[in-house]
Image (cartoon, rainbow, N blue to C red):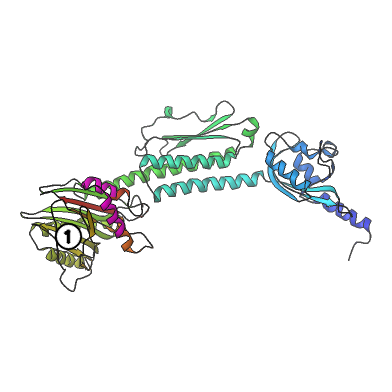
Amino acid sequence: MPFASDAEQIRVLAAALEQSTTATCITRASLDQPGPEIVYVNQAYLDLMGGSRDEVLGRSPRIMQGPHTERAVLDRLRADLGAGRTFEGETVNYRLDGSPFLIRWRIDPVRDEAGEIIFFVSSQRDVTVERRHERRLRSVEMVDAALRSVMLHPAEAGVDLDHFSAEVVDAADEIVAGFGSVQVTVAPDVHEPLDGATAGDAPTGGDHDGLRRSWDLSSATGSFAGALTVTFDDDVSRRFVDLVGLSQLAERVSSALDALFEYERRRQLAIELQESLLPDRRFTRPGFEIAARYVPGATGTQIGGDWYDVIAGEEHTTFVIGDVVGQGVGAAATMGRIRTATEVLLQRGHHLAAVAALVDRYCVEEGLMATMLLARHVGEELHVVSAGHLPPVMVSPPDVSLLDVVPGPPLGAGAMAPFELVSLPFALGDVLVMFTDGLAETPGEPIDVGLDYVRDTAVCASADPESMADKLIANRRDPTRRDDLAVLVCRRTT
């Protein structure tokens, strides 16, 4: 039932305001100096401010403002209230003892019967702990995201470390929230295990001159890996910054650095293993200038099954490129087996189609799957057999073309018919470009687009095989592609 009288309604509303846990303040509507006059505050407001009614009644809410109260927020507050709009905002305010806190508040105008604004009523909340928790979580997420980014899209070790360090600075800035400056220093070379570092290499940690604090970024072995240092703007800023959050962030960064160092170590070992299974990329064969390249996929520590080879016979030279299905150590091991089998068969003088058929039978028996392209120089011709592999490009300056090669089934598919050999002209000065799909393929695009790209890049490159191989790799279709790739470029000189 409704209130019995206006007096009862006023008493109930007053009791509700007084007992509410939301800090509430009512002021007169004047916005000019010295500011709105406080005419009422409830107990929650006094608990928030840390004072008594005698200390706040008759004064302006501006007593809560201080050096770190954002001017832009106050300007927006005055503009909203001056226009009769509700204001909502968040900034740093100060209790009566001068201690800063982060306030979230809303101010609504109170109008009389004629529509004139006569009071402002504000509800206020201390969100310091809430925002600290949110910033801690965001800072950790930023460090984790930076680590994932480096591992999914690796570059050179130094570049990876610089990128990660910059992201750590941003993560620390998230916690510092504009109350100081952040510096992060880490070990200069992630290839080094850091075990050689000594305690003397590390900063002392803790407080320095009262406005600066450092946290050691130590590895799991206890070796010094770097330091996270924050220089505060002033003593109030230092009190306002979440030092516990920074300490927790430093621990997270230390763990991430351990992971990064181990990742880089494994990546280098993986690349070295893959390269050890491949022949020297600088081949020396009479009558040819040859360049080869291998680039690991963007998965970093994942090695793959791409390979190339050049096999010299008594009267001819055979160029080989292939790609085992899959990635990882298993694919690399498979690549080594298929490459060895192919090399033995070629050295025994088998016809190219016969080599493809025998390797296909071997792959069927062993449960292996791969593509392979064989190209043999014989006199003035190039004999080519494809086992499901992409066609090569022939550069005959000034012309360039994709060779019309009949693509047989992949190795391991169990060819039901003989592999078809195609004979094509191979003149002096011609350049043969063989490559795996990592150079041409891009998810969501037809393969013809990628093949046209390889052809166009080759025709714009120098006829020098080394320069052409470098340009093909540098301008590959999709640098972020996770597949590895191999390129073999051969120019006939005699």
User: Where is residue 238 drawn, in percent x and y?
Assistant: 62, 33
Label 1 crowding class (10 Å Cα cut-off): few <14, some 14-19, many 20+? many
State which quadrant residue 419 falls in.
bottom left
Element under label 1?
strand
State which quadrant residue 212 falls in.
top right
In the rendered structure, the answer to whether residue 194 lies left or right of residue 421 reads right
Of residues 55 and 426, the one nearer the viewer is: 426
Q: Amino acid at mark 1?
A: Leu
Q: Is-magenta flag for residue 454? A: yes
- Whether residue 102 appears in this view of the structure is no
Magenta-colored span? 451-471
User: Where is residue 289 drawn, in percent x and y?
Assistant: 16, 47
Give the residue at the far top of this rendering.
Answer: 209
User: Where is residue 291 drawn, in percent x and y?
Assistant: 20, 48
In the rendered structure, the answer to whether residue 353 lies left or right of residue 369 reads left
In percent of the image, x 67 and y 46: which residue is there? 127
In percent of the image, x 50 and y 47: which residue is there? 142
State which quadrant residue 343 falls in.
bottom left
Residue designated by label 1: 374
Please identify the dominant SS of the magenta region. Answer: helix
Give the residue at the far bottom of this rendering.
Answer: 416
- Whether residue 302 appears in this view of the structure is yes
Q: Is-magenta flag for residue 215? A: no
